[in-house]
Amino acid sequence: MTQSRIPSTKTLNRRRFLQTTAAAAGTFTLASALHAQGNDTIRIGLVGCGGRGTGAALNALKADPNVRLVAMGDAFADRLEASLGNLQRDATVANKIDVPAARRFVGFNAYQQVIAAVDVVLLATPPHFRPAHIEAAVNANKHIFAEKPVAVDGPGVRRVLAACQEAQRRRLSVVSGLCWRYHNGMRETFRRVLDGAVGEITTLQCNYNTGTLWHRVRQEGWSDMEWQLRNWLYFTWLSGDFNVEQHVHSLDKMAWAMRDQHPLRCVGLGGRQVRTGPEFGNIFDHMATVYEYPNGVKCFSFCRQQAGCANEVKDYIVGTQGKVDVMAHTITGNMNWRYSPMQARRDDMYQQEHNELFAAIRAGNPINNGEYMSKSTLLAIMGRMACYTGQAVTWEQALNSPDLSPPRYEWGNLPVMQIPRPGTTTITDTLWPS
């Protein structure tokens, strides 16, 4: 099988990226003017046709009366066809779907063909691929919806930050899948917190303790690469580990409370107690991390994916004049307040983020979530590194952490990354067997 030419962060040349993409920036001005008129069709494409990608496509199709899904791409044809079939069976959007066989792209480079065919691209592959996909979309002057997280390592975060800065210069929208920032109840809660409703923040706590998730039994004929991609949750190079892939939602809310100021360092612990079989790759099943901020605030972060345990997905903010139960949208203390539970149930943050994306495109008033989605991703990566190593990890160490990219992108042999061992694994380890 020919090796894919998907860009690697190991060979990224940011200067070349900016130089080669700058020449095309002027073409977006005309596209902006056309979309701003509100009377033309916006073509959308989906890259990554799993459940979350299918949901994003459905939201995008409902967000604007004149959009069409015209291209889809995935590593696997069966995933693409299943996603397309599910969308076509939804009567509310079926007439907005026009994805003939010629615009169904399969393989590592499918994203390039989708991006070339559309105005807006929805990026929902395993997180490892997000930096290359975001960069390519900006290079092609396309608006972006990027599912969380946006990277699995420091080089990926740096790559996304650079691409999103270029997107801002080109007036391209980049909307993040960190969807709680698009929930109206959460927005009102954090507006009050940032306006001082609980005084000065002293302590943060976030818990994402849940049960186990799916995994797919390896089938005869699957190569190592296919098996890992089809079970991407369980491989650090693909998912970033579950605290990056899932718990990033909670950490993003904590970052929001801290005005997206980054912590100085963190310490953590974690391991594999339940998911010990080879089918679970090399990730952990529990982690606990303490983040330390320059002003003395500490954030206590806990996440677990184990069956039969007490579950809790909750966040708390404690200040000098009160406290916040974030998920309940309540403030108690000097200023008691509660967002309407009935309204909270009606708020659809998944739909809202797409509504605002397409409204921004029509208005020619771009949204760019690039900075906070990158920083919140790095916050999670930083915590993973602390738990993997058992050492204190600084923000700068996380930002400059090793590239976790595999040696090559091809359907063949690929060893499983080593299982981290706190006290032995170092912050410079890639975990790839030597």
Image (cartoon, rainbow, N blue to C red):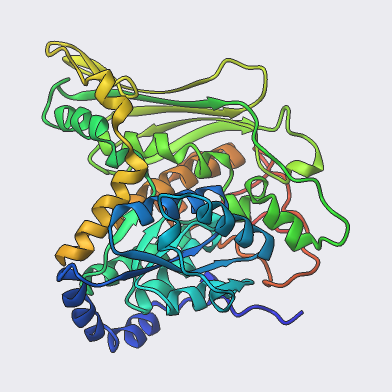
Residue 179: horizontal and vertical position, in percent? 35, 42
Nearer the observer, 369 or 202: 369
Q: Is residue 67 left or right of residue 332?
A: right
Residue 38: horizontal and vertical position, in percent? 18, 67
| Residue 237 image-quadrant placement | bottom right
The residue located at (49%, 56%) in the rendering is 124
Can you say which quadrant of the picture contains the N terminus?
bottom right
Residue 220: horizontal and vertical position, in percent? 88, 57
Specify whether residue 152 is in view: no
Can you say which quadrant of the picture contains the C terminus?
bottom right
Q: Is residue 63 left or right of residue 233?
A: left
The residue located at (36%, 87%) in the rendering is 20
Q: How many marks?
A: 0
The residue located at (17%, 24%) in the rendering is 200
In the figure, 420 relative to 74: above or below? above
Residue 95: horizontal and vertical position, in percent? 42, 61
Q: Is residue 290 left or right of residue 421?
A: left
Nearer the observer, 196 or 383: 196
Specify whether residue 115 is in view: yes
| Residue 161 image-quadrant placement | bottom left
The outermost residue toward the right is 220
The residue located at (62%, 71%) in the rendering is 108
| Residue 416 image-quadrant placement | bottom right
